[in-house]
Image (tube, rainbow, N blue to C red):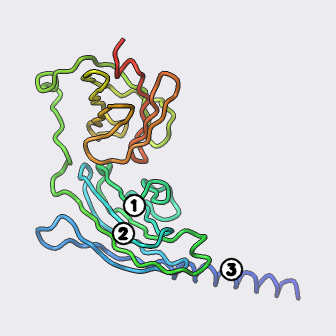
Amino acid sequence: MRFATTIGILLLLGLTSTVCAAEEARTEILQFAKGATGTSVSGSISGYETVNYKVTAKAGQQMVVKLATNHTATYFNVFAPGTGPGDAAMFIGSTSGERFAAELPASGTYTIQVYMMRSAARRNESADFKLRVDIDASQTSHPRPRSGDRNQTWAYDASGILPCSAGEPSFRRECPFQVKRNSGAAEIRTTKPLPDQGQRVLYFDNDRFRTDDDTPLNWQRQGDNWWLAAGQQEYYLIPDAVIYGG
């Protein structure tokens, strides 16, 4: 009897802890003023509190999210439609910084979660923040060339296939590319490894890469190749021969 009572108390305590954790997260719907393409919200969190901001957008639109706060352990994550906290995020602020910019892969409601790192949450610290969200009004953030006129509108030096992948750096896919070279620099236009997501434009110069839409990039040398990640979803392996020829 005493054992059963103990088990009951433990189950009740576990249920209570779960309910308390759920109460620490609040949800707010982001709405833009008529004619506006963005909005700013201010808020505060303390301890394990989180705020989940919901915003609806269409596939192909460009979304930019910026977080401003004086608290160095406060970040935000971005979740694709149909996912949320507890699932894999398409952007993780603690590793990628305070700015997210990407062409959206799907239509639906995105979740932007503002949170505090556990080390600070355990100390019950507090943080004020300002979140800015912008979504371009057009369907796409940059024009995509039609299949029949790319050769006429852009003179390139070489074309081929890049190893690429989506979601993880397995490089199991093949992304067609075109490259224009100029004295050790290069402009590379390749198809994104994500379905129906158009082009990825990369500029290389002085051992550095950048792109045309402010998507965060990470890269490193791997033998005679460059390993490059664009955002949290695109991965490319770019041989030196693509950049320099040969």
Residue 150 — which label? none
Q: Are marks 1 and 2 in contact (CB under 8 Å)?
A: yes
Residue type at tag 2? Ala
Locate the N terminus by quadrant. Answer: bottom right
Residue 193, placed above or below residue 122: above
* Structural crowding at the residue carrying mark 3, measured as other residues with C-alpha within 10 Å and reported as few (<14), some (14–19) or many (≥20): few
Q: Position of residue 136 (x, y in %)?
A: 19, 57
Name the N-terminal-most of marks 3 and 2: 3
What residue do we see at 27% from left, 51% from top? 59
| Foreground label between 3 and 2 | 2
Name the N-terminal-most of marks 3 and 1: 3
What residue do we see at 55% from left, 68% from top? 117
Q: What element carries label 1?
A: loop
Q: Do the residues labelled 3 and 2 touch (CB within 8 Å)?
A: no
- Distance in Å between CA atoms under marks 3 and 2: 36 Å
Q: Position of residue 70 (x, y in %)?
A: 42, 73
Residue 125 location, quadrant: bottom right
Residue 98 — which label? 1
Q: Mark 2 points at which residue?
A: 68
Name the N-terminal-most of marks 1 and 2: 2
Q: Do the residues labelled 3 and 1 touch (CB within 8 Å)?
A: no
Single out the residue that lies furthest toward the right.
Answer: 2
Front-lying residue, 143 or 196: 143
Residue 14 — which label? 3
Q: Is mark 2 on a helix, strand or loop?
A: strand
Image side of residue 155 versus residue 64, left or right = left
Residue 17, placed above or below residue 209: below
Image side of residue 118 versus residue 77, left or right = right
- Distance in Å between CA atoms under marks 1 and 2: 7 Å
Residue type at tag 1? Glu
